[in-house]
Image (spheres, rainbow, N blue to C red):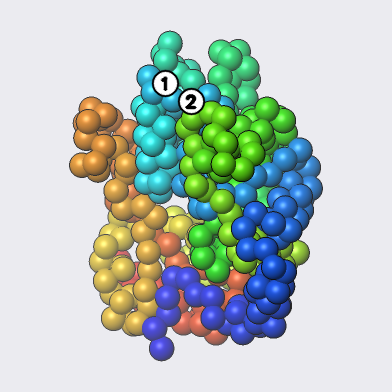
């Protein structure tokens, strides 16, 4: 049996009746678009975070894009973020017409907030920290910097459902926050989905208009831009059921992480740590080794598939060559990208399957020493 870096079938088997009931609830409701399930999920997700508003959208990429647009970001503006993120974060910035500006990261893979002020220009409009791999950026100095310079903060929380930073939930520390519900996420749908949290009623109003063609009432466009970016009713109802299980998903991920830490403690892998003030949810379990590629290839011979999140920093991709970044521009980001890889991580990962991963990995590491 091949062990994959992520799987959902065991989880589905355990939750199948509830998932199918969610589908039946929507199909039997008589309303399939922007109806009771989306509305209820928005209310419940906002309440979970102590936020004033939640706006469901069709995917995480558009959650970032619409979030930026609702904050007034557009052509000619600059948005400061990081390069070691999924490309959609940066594609969303580019999709508004704004220019992404990158700062380097720390050894914990998170934005080096101390470098942000030096990257500011008169065109800077928004700061976009990415809460990567399951824990949060150091937000207090970023919030102070944003307030001092009159900038908006949009949190990218695609990988941080349930994470806390000094007791504050990811998604409640900026003007707005973008979430993805892609199936692999800590809170994942059975297809695409996303949402934006905000406690600003004007941002909420703008988001609802942006996701629905720029309309405030049916058939009448009141402002541009406008998009067709609605969260699907079926996915919303499934997410409602899964939201009630979020704490158990996080607890299971932490237990998987604990077993990895115990089983790999005496190896020369660099294991993930939890940065000060954070409560990690382990969206992925990222380790480091200078011979990463050899390890991945050797584990494949054991029928174990690993992943790299992400092998190419965004600023090195040909699609972003026009931004003018040269090799060496972000040295920590570039070095880490050559060493990181992810071990299998999901709530239903069985201990005996995880043991097989640990044993095979230890065996391979011995051959490389």
Q: Please, what secondary structure does the residue beneath circle 2 have?
A: loop
Examine the rendered structure and indicate whether residue 71 appears above or below residue 59.
above
Residue 39 position within the rendered picture, expressed as x and y whole percent measured from the top left = 72, 53
Residue 259 position within the rendered picture, expressed as x and y whole percent measured from the top left = 59, 70
Quarter residue 147 falls in: top right
Examine the rendered structure and indicate whether residue 89 appears above or below residue 284.
above
Quarter residue 340 falls in: bottom left
Check disc 1 and report the residue beneath it.
77
Distance in Å between CA atoms under marks 1 and 2: 6 Å
Q: Residue at x 39, y 23 (%)?
A: 75
Q: Is residue 48 left or right of residue 313?
A: right
Evaluate whether residue 186 shows in this view: no
Q: Is residue 341 left or right of residue 185?
A: left
Q: Is residue 47 left or right of residue 92?
A: right
Mark 1 surroundings within 10 Å by alpha-carbon count, few (fewer than 14), some (14 through 19), many (20 or more): some
Is label 1 in contact with label 2 (beta carbons under 8 Å)? Answer: yes
**Front position in the image: 320 or 282:** 320
Q: Residue at x 61, y 43 (%)?
A: 218
**Front position in the image: 226 or 63:** 226
Q: Residue at x 26, y 29 (%)?
A: 323
Residue 248 position within the rendered picture, expressed as x and y whole percent measured from the top left = 72, 67
Quadrant in the picture for the N terminus = bottom left
In the rendering, which numbered label is found on residue 305?
none
Mark 2 surroundings within 10 Å by alpha-carbon count, few (fewer than 14), some (14 through 19), many (20 or more): many
Q: Residue at x 68, y 27 (%)?
A: 202
Residue 305 position within the rendered picture, expressed as x and y whole percent measured from the top left = 37, 73
Q: Is residue 188 left or right of residue 48?
A: left
In the rendering, which numbered label is found on residue 73?
2
């Amino acid at each position: 049996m091949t062990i994959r870096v992520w799987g959902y079938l065991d989880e589905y088997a355990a939750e199948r009746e509830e998932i199918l009931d969610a589908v039946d609830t929507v199909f039997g409701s008589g309303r399939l678009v922007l109806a009771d399930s989306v509305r209820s999920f928005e209310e419940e997700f906002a309440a979970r975070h102590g936020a004033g508003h939640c706006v469901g959208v069709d995917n995480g990429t558009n959650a970032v894009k619409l979030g930026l647009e609702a904050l007034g970001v557009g052509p000619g503006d600059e948005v400061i973020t990081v390069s070691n993120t999924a490309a959609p974060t940066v594609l969303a910035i580019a999709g508004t017409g704004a220019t992404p500006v990158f700062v380097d990261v720390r050894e914990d893979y998170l934005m080096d907030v101390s470098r942000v002020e030096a990257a500011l220009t008169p065109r800077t409009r928004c700061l976009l920290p990415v809460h990567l791999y399951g824990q949060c950026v150091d937000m207090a100095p970023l919030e102070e910097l944003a307030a001092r310079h009159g900038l908006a903060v949009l949190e990218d929380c695609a990988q941080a459902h349930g994470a806390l930073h000094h007791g504050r939930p990811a998604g409640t520390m900026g003007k707005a926050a973008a979430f993805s519900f892609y199936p692999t996420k800590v809170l994942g749908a059975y297809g695409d989905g996303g949402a934006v949290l905000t406690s600003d009623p004007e941002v909420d109003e703008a988001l609802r208009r942006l996701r629905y063609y720029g309309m405030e009432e049916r058939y009448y466009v009141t402002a541009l831009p406008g998009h067709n970016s609605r969260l699907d009713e079926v996915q919303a109802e499934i997410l409602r059921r899964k939201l009630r299980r979020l704490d158990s998903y996080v607890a299971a991920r932490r237990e998987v992480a604990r077993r990895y830490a115990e089983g790999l403690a005496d190896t020369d892998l660099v294991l993930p740590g939890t940065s000060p003030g954070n409560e990690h949810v382990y969206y992925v379990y990222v380790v480091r080794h200078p011979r990463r590629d050899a390890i991945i290839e050797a584990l494949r011979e054991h029928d174990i598939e690993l992943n790299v999140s992400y092998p190419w920093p965004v600023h090195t991709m040909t699609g972003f060559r026009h931004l003018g970044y040269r090799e060496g521009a972000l040295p920590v980001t570039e070095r880490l990208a050559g060493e990181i890889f992810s071990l299998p991580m999901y709530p239903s990962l069985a201990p005996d399957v995880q043991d097989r991963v640990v044993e095979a990995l230890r065996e391979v590491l011995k051959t490389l020493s």
